[in-house]
Structures are given as structure tokens and as C-alpha cells.
């Protein structure tokens, strides 16, 4: 079989060698007018050529000591971020991001705005932080105090002296950043820690005291820093994420399940309920926002299922567990007085309320893979 390039045509080669670009002209009144354009055309511009160039240094903090640093709202806009080899720094990342890795940091105070993916601490020591994320992990870390909002089960590995509390923080853009990161303020598993490398007879993690204040761990930004213009609050009442008791021992054997169905004012209504209930001395144990199918209603709401199917199909439901002696009757009164025009579910009596709570939150945990 012959090869396409086996024989070279001398004639064609000669023509090729003698060929050169020419310009055709016509005579017009004795003047030669060139036809066509011999100048090279400018290169095509593609959409990716017009993008603003990204400087990797804008998305990392590295090798810093004794400074207040971070990023203001609008500076990350969902990009990845890296913090590494920092010592005795106050770090405020007040924006939403994709993922954040923190490596080899010592004696730092850190605030991280909502992270769509994972926050991963590695080889860090003496860290105090406020974190909101989808996934939280540590490896080879020592002595960390974490005020956490985590949509999934937090994981520690080869880490000791780890202490956890419920997220308590506010700045004006924080609610929007939660939404941009795809996180719900009602899905917070801050106290449900999984120790990947437990040691027999030892406990590598514990919960911070219930009355712990973020300011005792992470200070406000230096008034002379770039963050002085951001209105920050660490008061529990102003926190974007509701303050929950989590896995701590309940004060009462009576709990109540209170469920709001999808609607324009669901979040505002849930906050109103929390304010009403806590002002009467009741305690918020946990919250969840989860989607349900009509077939899930029977298992979760049992005899009330038929009336609720229509509302379940409209979107995610938001549930709260409140605790305290007399809480069921109090919640029924709040429902009648404050939310009379709103479709909701409230435990009917204290004899079945524990079953209501267990049925819903067990279902929610299974849906979320916890």
C-alpha cells in the first residue's frame, strides 16, 4: 500500500516556492488603486479573553504574624480561599466562598462567612473560630474552640482538645451570604461530632459551656482595621443562625414539635416563634429545614397527614423542637394568638409530643444522610 507522502511533486513544489502574495490593482485616472487588504487581520476576541484576570494572592493569606487581616463582603464572591502559616492573627473572612483550607496556623482568631463546600483545618493549634459551612473537618489539630454552623456531621481526625458551641454571629450581608452559599440557617449539626480516630478511655472533643460568649474567644475587629465599617454583633438574639441547645442534656422531659410549611414568611415566622417561646422561658433544642414527599407525611405526621399533604408539596418545611415544662400548651396558645392565619403543625398534647419530635427529626436526619 502506498503512502500518501511517498512521492513529492516537483511541479507543485516549484509552484509553492515561487508563489508569493500579490496585490491586484486597477488603473483609475492614471492612479493605481489597490484591491483587497494586505494588512493582517486583528486576532479574534473570545469571551474568556475579556474576563478580568484573577490574582491568586487575592484568595490566600499566608505567612502572616500579629496582624488583623481578611476579606470584606464582595471580595470573594464564591471563590476558594486558603489560609496558611499564620501566627497570632485576627482573621475575618466576611464573604461567602466555595471552600476554605486552613493549614499550619497557630494562636489565631478566625471568622469565616458561609462556605458552600468544606472547611478543612490541618495541623493547626490554639485556634478560636466562628464557622458556617456545608462540611467541617479537622486533621492533626490541637486545642480549638469552634462556634459552628454545619449542615452535615462535623468530623475530627487525629485531633485533641476540640470544643464546640453553636454559631452566634451577625453582619449585615450574612443572611444573603448564607443564601448565596446554598446553606439553611435552620440546618445546624454543630454538636453532632464524629471522631474518626477515637482513643479508648479518652474524649477528644466536648461542648463549650452553654453560656459561652463569642467575644470571650474571638474579639471584634481592630477599630483601625479595614473592617471598622462592618457592623458586627455577637449577641445571640441577633445571630443569623438560631441559638440551639444541641446535644446537651434537656432541662425537661416535655418537648414540642412546631412545623412551618413553605411560604413567603416562613423564616420570619420561625424567628417570631423563637422569640415568643424563649421569652416565656422555653429552650430551643434543634431546628431543621427539609423537603418532604406526600408519602412521607403519613409516617411523620400520622393522623394529621391527610390535611398536610397539600402544603408539603409547596416546598421545604421548617421544624423546631422547643423544650420545657408546659411547652406544648404554650406553643398551642402561641399558634392561636400569633399565627392564626398560618398553616402549621403543633404537637397536640404532651403524651404524644415526644413521638412527634422523634418521628420528624429521625426522618430529617435520614433525608440529610446524618
Image (cartoon, rainbow, N blue to C red):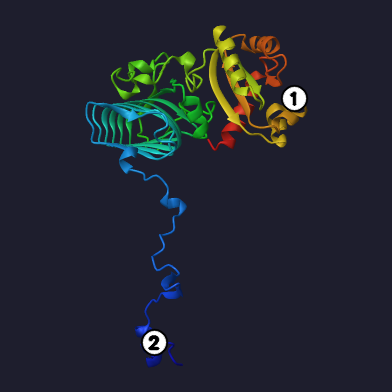
Q: Residues within 10 Å of mark 2 (few under 14, many from 20)?
A: few
Q: Are marks 1 and 2 in contact (CB under 8 Å)?
A: no
Question: Which disc, if any, is residue 15?
Answer: 2
Q: Secondary structure at mark 1?
A: helix
Q: Residues within 10 Å of mark 1 (few under 14, many from 20)?
A: few
**Residue farthest to the right?**
306
Residue 270 point in image, percent of width and height: 60, 19
Of the image marks 1 and 2, the number of the one nearer the N terminus:
2
Q: Quadrant of residue 214?
A: top left
Q: Nearer the viewer, residue 97 or 25?
A: 25
Q: Quadrant of residue 103?
A: top left
**At 41% from the left edge and 71% from the top edge, which residue is drawn?**
31
**Residue tagged by mark 1?**
304
Q: Quadrant of residue 202?
A: top left
Q: Nearer the viewer, residue 12 or 262?
A: 12
| Label 1, label 2: how far apart the Cα atoms are | 90 Å
Amino acid at each position: 500500500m502506498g503512502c500518501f507522502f511517498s512521492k513529492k511533486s516537483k511541479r507543485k513544489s516549484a509552484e509553492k516556492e515561487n508563489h508569493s502574495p500579490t496585490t491586484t490593482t486597477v488603473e483609475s485616472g492614471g492612479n493605481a488603486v489597490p484591491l483587497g487588504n494586505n494588512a493582517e487581520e486583528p486576532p479574534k476576541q473570545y469571551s474568556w479573553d475579556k474576563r478580568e484576570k484573577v490574582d491568586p494572592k487575592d484568595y490566600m493569606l499566608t505567612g502572616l504574624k500579629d496582624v488583623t487581616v481578611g476579606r470584606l463582603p464582595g471580595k470573594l464572591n464564591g471563590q476558594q480561599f486558603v489560609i496558611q502559616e499564620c501566627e497570632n492573627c485576627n482573621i475575618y473572612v466576611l464573604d461567602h466562598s466555595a471552600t476554605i483550607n486552613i493549614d499550619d496556623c497557630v494562636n489565631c482568631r478566625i471568622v469565616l462567612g458561609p462556605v458552600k463546600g468544606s472547611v478543612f483545618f490541618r495541623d493547626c493549634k490554639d485556634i478560636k473560630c466562628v464557622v458556617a459551612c456545608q462540611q467541617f473537618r479537622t486533621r492533626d489539630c490541637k486545642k480549638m474552640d469552634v462556634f459552628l454552623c454545619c449542615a452535615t456531621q462535623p468530623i475530627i481526625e487525629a485531633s485533641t482538645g476540640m470544643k464546640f458551641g453553636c454559631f452566634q454571629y451577625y453582619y449585615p450581608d450574612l443572611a444573603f451570604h448564607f443564601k448565596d452559599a446554598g446553606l439553611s440557617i435552620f440546618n445546624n449539626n454543630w454538636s453532632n461530632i464524629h471522631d474518626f480516630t477515637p482513643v479508648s478511655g479518652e474524649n477528644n472533643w466536648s461542648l463549650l459551656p452553654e453560656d459561652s460568649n463569642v467575644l470571650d474567644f474571638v474579639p471584634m475587629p481592630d477599630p483601625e482595621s479595614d473592617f471598622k465599617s462592618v457592623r458586627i454583633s455577637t449577641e445571640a438574639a441577633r445571630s443569623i443562625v438560631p441559638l440551639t441547645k444541641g446535644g446537651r442534656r434537656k432541662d425537661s422531659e416535655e418537648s414540642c414539635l412546631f412545623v412551618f410549611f413553605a411560604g413567603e414568611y416562613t423564616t420570619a415566622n420561625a424567628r417570631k416563634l423563637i422569640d415568643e417561646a424563649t421569652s416565656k422561658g422555653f429552650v430551643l433544642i434543634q431546628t431543621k429545614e427539609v423537603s418532604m414527599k406526600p408519602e412521607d407525611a403519613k409516617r411523620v405526621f400520622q393522623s394529621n397527614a391527610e390535611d398536610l399533604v397539600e402544603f408539603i408539596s409547596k416546598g421545604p418545611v421548617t421544624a423546631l423542637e422547643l423544650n420545657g415544662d408546659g411547652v406544648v400548651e404554650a406553643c398551642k396558645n402561641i399558634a392561636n394568638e400569633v399565627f392564626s392565619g398560618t398553616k402549621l403543625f403543633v404537637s397536640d398534647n404532651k403524651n404524644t409530643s415526644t413521638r412527634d419530635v422523634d418521628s420528624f427529626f429521625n426522618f430529617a436526619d435520614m433525608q440529610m444522610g446524618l
